[in-house]
Amino acid sequence: MAVAQMENDVQCDIAVIGGGPGGSTAAALLTRRGYRVVVLEKAHHPRFHIGESLLPMNLPLFERLGVLDKVRAIGVHKRGADFESDTPAGYSTFAFDRALGSSPPHAYQVYRQDFDKMLFEHARQCGADAREGVEVFAVDQAGPRDSTLSVRTDDGGSYTVRAKYVVDASGRDGFMASKKKLRRRNREHQSAAIFGHFSGAEHRPGDDAGNISIYRFEHGWMWMIPLPGGVMSVGAVCRPDYLKTRRGQNVDFLMATLNGNVQLAQRLAGATLIDNEVRVTGNYAYDASAMAGPGWILIGDAYAFLDPVFSSGVYLAMNGAEQAVDVVDRALREPRSEAAAQRSMQRRVRKGMRRFAFFIYRFNGPVMTKLFRNPRNALQLEQGVISMLAGDVYDSRPVWLRLQMFKMVYGVGVALDLRRWWAERKLRLSQAAAD
């Protein structure tokens, strides 16, 4: 569908800021509904991005979007996630085919630069005016259906885009949340990451070869993600104060960090860091105090970001984009229903995030460590956790009930752990007094 362009002014129905998974998904689906959509991506595809591990609940969305075969062609088959355990193999696989509900039995690992480029091109093929190398630097709202976006191009040009609605999918830039002073640090959970790509790393045997592997170490947790071509993405998510201790070369710091877990270090014994390239990122956890307002909405990382231990980022962004399409469509057709639709979406998104966050915030604690190292399926609790790992955090009542029961088990474990700690403390104090 053509977009009318005048001398220094582009007219459209919906402007999408950002051409990542959330923005491209929203653009493709909105264009299919007959809207004139302009996507404004400041970088050029392909561009590097972390977040290479997808969830099974992405797959039905890929199918609705019409890209499942394309994802399959660029991905590594992922049948589950594995965590360190006390088994003879040294790890336990949380296989997705054991999940409750109707989540698919597998997912994929992808190079994000290839995945994001494919989705961006798909939005263009659906009819969106998808632009690269253009950065939005200001938004002015004359009214709820009249926004003007000021844009500069990477060749030094500039122009404006006028839209009836703005979808902010700007990722961790959080463009509108920053402009409107909505952004909040997550003081309950802060983290940073250091990572690289390796060749020659040891894969899991057999059907587990495509699994994401999760390890713990003193300062946080680590990942190993198999990628196409025998490449392994390996990194550590840690507390920011640990990352601030690095001195000298990032390569040396990364390798010293990865050696903090014996099992992971063994799998890297014969590996080589590709191009000696190490990347560092910080300030992982944040959210915005509001998701939407008259004529605008935030999706994906532009709204909030959780620690990536359960690979939820791409799914939350694309699922949020799909929900936002319904909200925007309804707002443009029935303006009086906009606020209610936005509130309903925000409640639903936050519900899913809370279910991930319960596990994320406690992941490195002693009780959660024990539960993951020695999984038990009493009352199908392990299967409920697998469903959460698959991304089934919204609508399945059986999953929700198991997660509630898991919280109760966790609470009992915390109480017992506290009781044990208190008894040991009393013993130490009595021994010290006797000495």
Image (cartoon, rainbow, N blue to C red):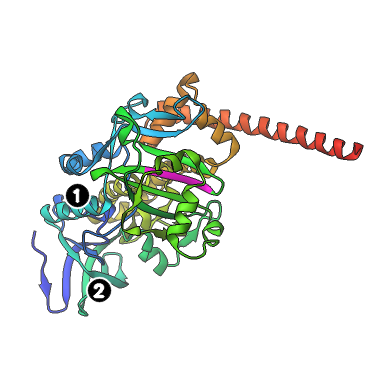
Q: Is residue 249 left or right of residue 409?
A: left
Q: Is residue 44 visible?
A: yes
Image quadrant occupied by the C terminus: top right
- The residue type indicated by label 2 comes to Val
Q: Give the number of the mark in front: 1 or 2.
A: 2
Please tell me whether residue 217 is drawn above or below residue 295 in the rendered image.
above
Please tell me whether residue 244 is drawn above or below residue 267 in the rendered image.
below
Which residue is farthest top? Answer: 378
Q: Start and end of the magenta stretch?
A: 220-224
Considering depth in this image, is 24 or 35 the residue closer to the camera? 24
Residue depicted at x 50% and y 40% = 262
The answer to whether residue 111 is magenta is no
The residue carrying mark 2 is 151
Q: Is residue 399 left or right of residue 140?
A: right
The answer to which quarter of the image holds residue 380 is top left
First in residue order: circle 1 vs circle 2: 1
Q: Is residue 255 left or right of residue 75?
A: right
Considering depth in this image, is 42 or 343 the residue closer to the camera? 42
Badge 2: how crowded within 10 Å, few (<14), some, or many (20+)? some
- The residue type indicated by label 1 comes to Leu
Q: Main secondary structure of the magenta part?
A: strand
Residue depicted at x 30% and y 28% = 207
Q: Position of residue 97 (x, y in %)?
A: 32, 26
The answer to which quarter of the image holds residue 129 is bottom left
Badge 1: how crowded within 10 Å, few (<14), some, or many (20+)? many
Q: Secondary structure at mark 1?
A: helix
Q: Position of residue 223 (x, y in %)?
A: 41, 44
Residues at marks 1 and 2 touching, judged by CB atoms closer than 8 Å? no
